[in-house]
Amino acid sequence: MVMQIRRDDRVTIEQKVEVRDPEYGTEVESWEVVTGPIWANVQDVLPSRAEKTVSNLATATQSTRLRILKGHVVAPDMRVRLHGRFGNRVMQIVAGPALLDDRMHNEFMLEGSSHGG
């Protein structure tokens, strides 16, 4: 029996673009929307946080599983913006895609960080 995947969260897929600053002519990093917002299944991986301190800077890392329909183009150098119950959280794609057993969904692993003093 194939598992049912509940797509009840909204996400936006973004890719990095290089644009030129009109005043100085230097390259400026920006992000543009590739797909979205789309419906997805978003689930935190348990335990959901890992914390470490380097040079007196505390960093908390959170891993999240993302499942979307396989028709969407997503590459490892893109990022995902989570909406809704997650606020407006931005996460990097760290693994995937992996085609799930139902052959209709891809799964990605996401990672987000927060810094504190």
Image (tube, rainbow, N blue to C red):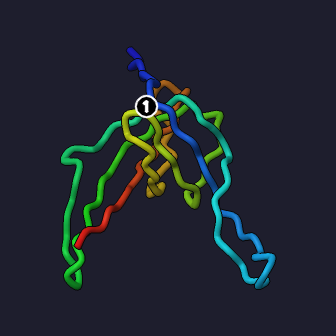
Q: What element carries label 1?
A: strand
User: Would you place residue 68 above or below residue 45 in this image?
Assistant: above
List x then y, in percent, for residue 6.
Answer: 42, 21
The image shows a total of numbered marks equal to 1
**In this view of the protein, which residue sits in the foreground, 53 or 65?**
53
Location of the C terminus by quadrant is bottom left
Q: In which quarter of the image is residue 4?
A: top left
Nearer to the camera, 59 or 41: 59
**Amino acid, disc 1:** Asn
Q: Whole-percent x and y of residue 109?
A: 41, 49
Which is more toward the observer, 52 or 4? 52
Q: Residue at point 73% right, 83% down?
A: 26
Q: Which of the 4 image quarters holds residue 49? A: bottom left
Residue 27 in the image: above or below residue 62: below
How crowded pointer 1 is (Cα within 10 Å; few <14, some 14-19, many 20+) is rated as some
To which residue does mark 1 refer?
A: 41
Determine whether, in the image, residue 115 is placed left or right of residue 28: left
**As drawn, is 42 to the left or to the right of 115?**
right
